[in-house]
Structure formats: structure tokens, C-alpha cells
Image (spheres, rainbow, N blue to C red):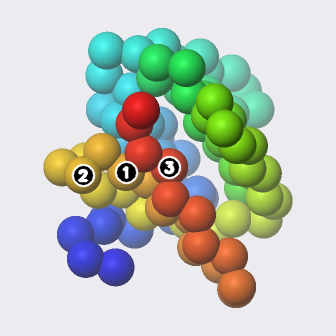
Amino acid sequence: MGDYERVAIENWKAIVSHLREFAAGGEVSESGEGIEITVGSATFLVTRDGRVAAGMALHDFEDGGVEALYFDHDAEAIRVEGGDLSYEFRKP
């Protein structure tokens, strides 16, 4: 997957750190359950139990049981991979 860095959901501090970096210039909302970032009109939510939800102007995405996220800060992208699933969230 190119220059993506794999970060396991169980490494919660790293997930939060990467999402805060990704959301630079946007909004970050963190709770005991998870973290949500808003960049422009797009949102990306991750919970500690591996649920991921994303919303953009033309589509929404949600999946549970995600084990890791893949970050490419240079490309401003986050990938969710698992089984037959492949989803990429990019800054608008």
C-alpha cells in the first residue's frame, strides 16, 4: 500500500496522534468512546472498539471491527482495509 503507515486500533494513543495531525486546520472532538475529526465538510470517526464512520458531501461509509488504520500524511489520506473492504478517506 505504498507509503501508508499501519496503526493498530489497540494502539489508541497513536491513532489519536495521527488523527490530530491529519485534522490540522480542522476540528477534533475526543471522548472516552472515540475520536471524530472534521475537515471542511467531511467527518471521520473512530471508536476504541474499531468502528469507523466517514461522511462526505456525496457519500457515507461505516464499518465495524476494523483492526487498523493506514495513514499517508503526505497524500492526506487514511485507508481502511479488511477482508473484501477497501476505503480511502481523503481531505476535501
Mark 2 and mark 1 in contact? Answer it, CB < 8 Å. yes
- Residue sitting at x 24%, y 52%: 75
Element on which disc 3 rests: strand
Q: CA distance from mark 2 to mark 1?
A: 5 Å
Q: Which mark is residue 11?
A: none
Image x and y of residue 84, in percent: 70, 85
Total marks placed: 3
Residue topped by disc 1: 77
| First in sequence: mark 2 vs mark 3 | 2
Residue topped by disc 2: 75
Image x and y of residue 92, in percent: 41, 32
Element on which disc 2 rests: loop
Mark 3 and mark 1 in contact? Answer it, CB < 8 Å. yes
Q: Nearer the viewer, residue 56 or 1?
A: 56
- Residue sitting at x 64%, y 68%: 67
Badge 1, how many Cα within 10 Å: few under 14, some, many 20+? some
Extreme residue in the bottom direction: 83
